[in-house]
């Protein structure tokens, strides 16, 4: 199987760096500079679009954050699931909504990149379609197996992959998405060859793992956490330098003897491009305030998610930087398996 070039590997490794420590001031915006009335109007409704199924990691976190934002904005925050097309349906909805602040949605980094950089997904948006209002959390990437898996640790799983190259099935949440990129990085770095199976969402991927359709799955720990606590999934490793505070009993990949870069995801929220600057600022302030609420932070911890604030301006810069790095990686992936 063709592997990633050394240059591409370096680029992918850079993508895997954690966002912890990012910060900044309120984001700027190329939209209008004012609105006809104060935002939001008391009692109005703001849709928070989750481009995946109810019960998935994105959905759980939105439902933690929304009540806190609702309280400090004085407007209703309604979480709306619009799944399909590997998140493209929901992302299209946000990108094409009226730019008045009444529609916000996830634009998680790096996962959103594979949605529009892969031409086969026929996305009606790109980076310029959105204005970020901030990122409220990040989580580590883990590898999990079904509760009945014969593989008791990550070494046993990887030994099985080496013994039968191209046959051990692993689920991802989309073709050319962050799961896919991270798996390719592991393949290239560790000399492995997975049988990669793509699903339409993180929820579908986890359901396939619980059902035994795939041998293992890779993704953010928050997506696995509920099924891990219930015993339906066993998490074999955390792809970080240090153990996760949420699952301290699970060894790191480096601790198991595999030298790879740390991997993490972040939960960014955006509005349609052209949303007035004062509206963006109000939403950003609300999201930040909600993320700093001790009760919210406790709930995020309960969902195995680290509360880390990144301003809208810093998310915008991060997004541009990651796109520059990731585009050639995805172009190469699309020419392969």
Image: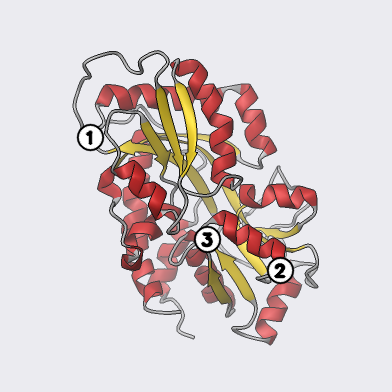
Numbered disc 3: secondary structure: loop
Numbered disc 2: secondary structure: loop
Q: Residue 305's spot in the image, x, y percent?
A: 61, 41
* Residue indicated by mark 3: 173
Tag shown at residue 274: 1
The answer for how far apart the CA atoms under marks 2 and 1 are is: 45 Å
Q: Residue 235's spot in the image, x, y percent?
A: 72, 58
In-image side of 291 versus 163 (left or right)? left
Q: Relative to 33, does residue 300 appear above or below in the rendering?
A: below
Foreground mark, 3 or 2? Answer: 2
Residue shown at 46%/27% (left/top)?
287
Mark before the other along the chain sequence, 2 or 1:
2
Local packing at callout 3 (Cα closer than 10 Å; few below 14, some 14-19, many 20+) is many
Residue shown at 66%/83% (left/top)?
162
Q: Are dots 1 and 3 in contact, CB under 8 Å? A: no
Numbered disc 1: secondary structure: loop
Q: Residue 135's spot in the image, x, y percent?
A: 45, 37
Foreground mark, 2 or 1? Answer: 2
* Residue indicated by mark 2: 212
Mark before the other along the chain sequence, 3 or 2:
3
Residue shown at 35%/29% (left/top)?
102
Closer-to-camera residue (303/125): 125
Q: Relative to 17, does residue 303 appear above or below in the rendering?
A: above
In-image side of 164 versus 152 (left or right)? left
């Amino acid at each position: 199987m063709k592997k990633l070039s050394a240059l591409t590997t370096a680029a992918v490794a850079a993508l895997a760096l954690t966002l912890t420590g990012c910060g900044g001031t309120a984001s700027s915006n190329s939209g209008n500079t004012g609105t006809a009335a104060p935002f939001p109007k008391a009692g109005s409704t703001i849709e928070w679009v989750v481009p995946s199924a109810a019960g998935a990691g994105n959905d759980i976190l939105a439902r933690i954050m929304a009540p806190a934002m609702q309280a400090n904005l004085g407007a209703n925050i309604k979480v709306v699931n619009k799944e399909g097309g590997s998140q493209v349906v929901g992302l299209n909805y946000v990108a094409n909504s009226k730019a008045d602040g009444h529609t916000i949605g996830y634009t998680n980094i790096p996962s959103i990149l594979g949605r529009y950089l892969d031409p086969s997904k026929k996305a009606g948006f790109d980076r310029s379609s959105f204005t970020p209002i901030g990122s409220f959390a990040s989580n580590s990437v883990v590898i999990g197996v079904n509760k009945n898996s014969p593989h008791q640790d990550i070494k046993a799983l990887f030994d099985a992959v080496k013994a039968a190259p191209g046959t051990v099935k692993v689920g991802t949440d989309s073709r050319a998405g962050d799961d896919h990129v991270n798996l390719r990085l592991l393949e290239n770095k560790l000399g492995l060859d997975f049988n990669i199976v793509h699903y339409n969402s993180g929820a579908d991927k986890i359901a396939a793992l619980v059902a035994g359709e795939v041998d293992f799955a890779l993704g953010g720990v928050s997506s696995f956490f509920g099924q891990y606590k219930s015993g339906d999934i066993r998490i074999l490793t955390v792809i970080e330098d240090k153990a996760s505070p949420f699952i301290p009993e699970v060894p790191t990949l480096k601790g198991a003897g595999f030298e790879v870069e740390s991997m993490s995801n972040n939960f960014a929220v955006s509005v349609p491009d052209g949303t007035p600057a004062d509206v963006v600022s109000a939403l950003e302030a609300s999201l930040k305030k909600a993320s700093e609420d001790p009760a919210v932070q406790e709930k995020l911890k309960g969902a195995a998610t680290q509360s880390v604030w990144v301003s809208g301006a810093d998310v915008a810069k991060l997004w541009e930087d990651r796109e520059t790095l990731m585009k050639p990686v995805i172009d190469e992936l699309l020419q392969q398996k």
